[in-house]
Image: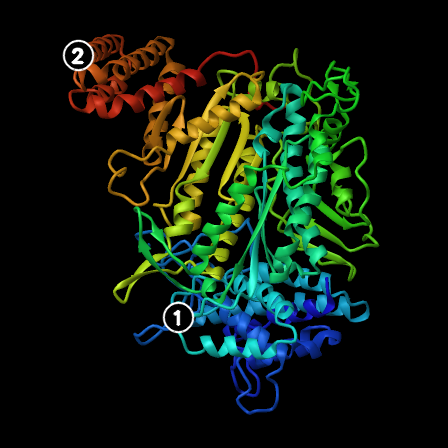
Amino acid sequence: MREDLGKIALAALLHDIGKFAYHAGDEVDGRKDHALLGDKFVRLHVPSVWQNALAPVGWHHGDPEGKGHETFPVQVVQLADRLSAGEREKRDEEGHEPPQMASPFSRLGPSPAQLAWLPVGPLKLDKNLSPKPNHLSENELKSVYKGLWEDFRNEADKLRKLHEANPNLDTYIANMLDLLFRYTWCVPSAFYYDVPDVSLYDHLRTTAAIAACIYVSFAGREGEVRKILTSIKGKDSPDWPPEPDVAALVEGDISGIQDFIYGLKNPRGAASVLRARSFYLQILTEVIARWMLRKMGLPPTNLLYCGGGRFRLLVPLEELNRLEDLGAHVNRVLLRAHRGALYLALEGVPLSPAHFAWAPVHMENERWEASRGLRATEDVLAQKLSQRKQRRFLELPSEDLAELFRPFGDEKGVCDVCGGPGIVEEDEEGIRWCPSCRSFRELGRSLREAKFLRLVWKEPRPLSEQNTWEGVLNFFGFRLDIINNKLPEPAQEISILWRLTDKAFPPRTSQEISVRKFLVNVVATWKEGEKSPRPEKFKEEHGEIKSFDVLAANARGAEYIGVLRMDMDNLGWLLRDGFVVQKDGGYFDRGTFSRKHSLSTFLTIFFEGFVEKLVHDLAQEEGCERVYAVYSGGDDLFFVGSWDAMPILARRIRKEFAEFSGREDLGISAGLILVHEKYPLYLAAQEAASALEEAKTPRAESARNSRPPKKDAFCFLGRVIPWERFEEVREWMESLKEAVEKSGEARRLLFVLQEVEEEYQREKAKRGAWGPWIWRTAYWLSRHREMAQKTGQDTSLYEKLQQKLSGEAFAENIGFLGLAARWAELLTRKKGGESCARK
């Protein structure tokens, strides 16, 4: 990182830290000016070596006394601050919202919800993160902010002492970013303007990213920065000028992910490799993004997003000219290491002041369009990325493309796991492994009990012939260490120590970055004292990864594995059109730079952080691990595990997301299929994706009249049920299961309900809702109720079913009752072993 860019980024990163102090009741000589409070923080808690470069913290709102503080760095931070705060708008009415942050989800969508207020405290996944309908009182807020500010200052002071003797600006900024994330994720960036739904953390980091870009692009042109400031001063953001360009938004998107992860040929080998491949893609994405930052000399603040095979950078305008060469460099190694399976599409677009502002929009072909605002440039960027993906590897010279057609390794050997040719080794089970899959197998085993990950900066190395995941990271100049138990001594080089739990662990040297990383590191392993579900077939191996056939045997009832995919409904629409509001006789998109990145931060917290907690909670309740996370991030997830655990987990995720977002109407749909343990994973992944698409089919009552259409459903056992009826189906399943467990004769009821439901689904298009199935069902239930009554058995179940399946009620309920019967039938199948028994 360039030293001068680091200093301007740090000044921008801390420019509004005084607002945090203000909320805590801090003051300077009786004054509560946030710029003065920020300057006080710098003098007390930032290493002295950088304090002289942080004048913008105290002067970013101008130099009213004319003391000569309007320097170029101050003007850069002033402009970056204003652009980052493009969502703010002075309201006409008196008063303001309380200094407590509203959930970023509160104002999303065509029908924004009542404001919900986030809890105030350090970010910890083991605490309740759900917003509340009522905000705290002024005294309550001051009290909690005071404690939060005190903890933050203590952590910042530890960081200061570490860097006083051996300063390293790159690692200091990265560690400060982590502190700000932990302590200001819930602090509003402003509350006098508009609703406070942008966190101080997201405002500070985006301001720092913008400042670094402006500093590079306008060096030696201070007058132009002053001119831009004048052009936007006192104006609402929709009136900001469309020129000049001030920065560039760059996005990298790795394609081919699904085939790379799921295209495994051997189910026994797949269990240990699957999670490793998914994890590798997460790390690879981050490594490429950080490699690009290093190539450009940019600070860590300029990595805006990284996850799901995608990353976003904010870079100086001049760097757009280098993207072709940087992309070719990356794809050259991906082509060689992964035989064309993975490809990085890399594109960028310039941003002007107008792109950071509210944007006027108009309806065109039933879709909002704009020529300004972030939405306009994101549309162009998406189009460029799509075109780039259609020309995979064509930026490479012909001699590199020839790599696609040459033989790889020893053609006589074929890997049983990935199906690729190469030099293979056979294990004790007779499975042949290529070097790449062997390295993934070891990675998967190492991840089982990982407490920390460490990414170490190294000198880049040429790619070896073995094509292992370690070799690819080494090519970009990084080494990854998996740390399971005792933490080793700090690395001599710059390194990131990723904490995989909420427990804080401060950096030990000025070369070390210690940050929280959300990973959803869920791998089903044998626990100590766990009894094998089939001792004659499976041997307990404490700490080892359970294969898919063990997960199937761990299931209650029928021995299947479940493949679950979930995805937030209409997120693309919500990010693009969900911020559109009517104002002053027109329509405006308020989805500005900081607002969208604040929403992205919260999606990351849930899908990459909180979901892991939900899976671990389920395992703790059951006494054994039966779920395997393939991927969770962005706004979707993919899990494999014992089939009966999956509908319960899916429901919890849906329920917890509603509480986390404070919005019951922001749906998450799910698709779950059941397969045998030897079923090809790539086919199961495709079928689960198809089930998810069925669940996402807009409901009939909203398909035409609702924008976006309501989905929010669960496709399970071939039937789609709205989440609001899931509990009803589950309760019926429990009643039917209980009846079968009490009396084997009741099992016939399960098959009757399924047969009647199948007949109804098959014939209703031709015969309508009314058919012979209604009276036949009524006759059968009446007859068996009488038989139960004669033998002194409980008849309430038959009576309830008669009410649900009589007349017009039949069509409304038979689908859900048929599903409940199928669910109960699978759970009550006899099996030889126990699902989660202990020795």
Residue type at mark 1?
A: Asp
- The residue lying at 18 percent from left, 18 percent from top is 768
Residue 68, quarter of the rendered image: bottom right
Q: Measure the C-alpha gap from mark 2 to mark 1.
A: 69 Å
Q: Is residue 381 above or below residue 79?
A: above
Question: Could you say whether the residue bearing mark 1 is in a helix, strand or loop?
Answer: helix
- Residue furthest front as drawn: 398
Q: Is residue 793 something one can see in this rendering?
A: yes
Q: Is residue 302 left or right of residue 764?
A: right
Nearer the observer, 776 or 482 = 482
The quadrant the N terminus occupies is: bottom right
Nearer the observer, 316 or 196 = 316
The residue to which callout 2 is attached is 775
* Residue 143 screen position, x and y as percent: 50, 70
- The residue lying at 57 percent from left, 17 percent from top is 677
Nearer the observer, 493 or 551 = 493
* Residue 112 screen position, x and y as percent: 33, 55
Question: Could you say whether the residue bearing mark 2 is in a helix, strand or loop?
Answer: helix
Nearer the observer, 678 or 542 = 678
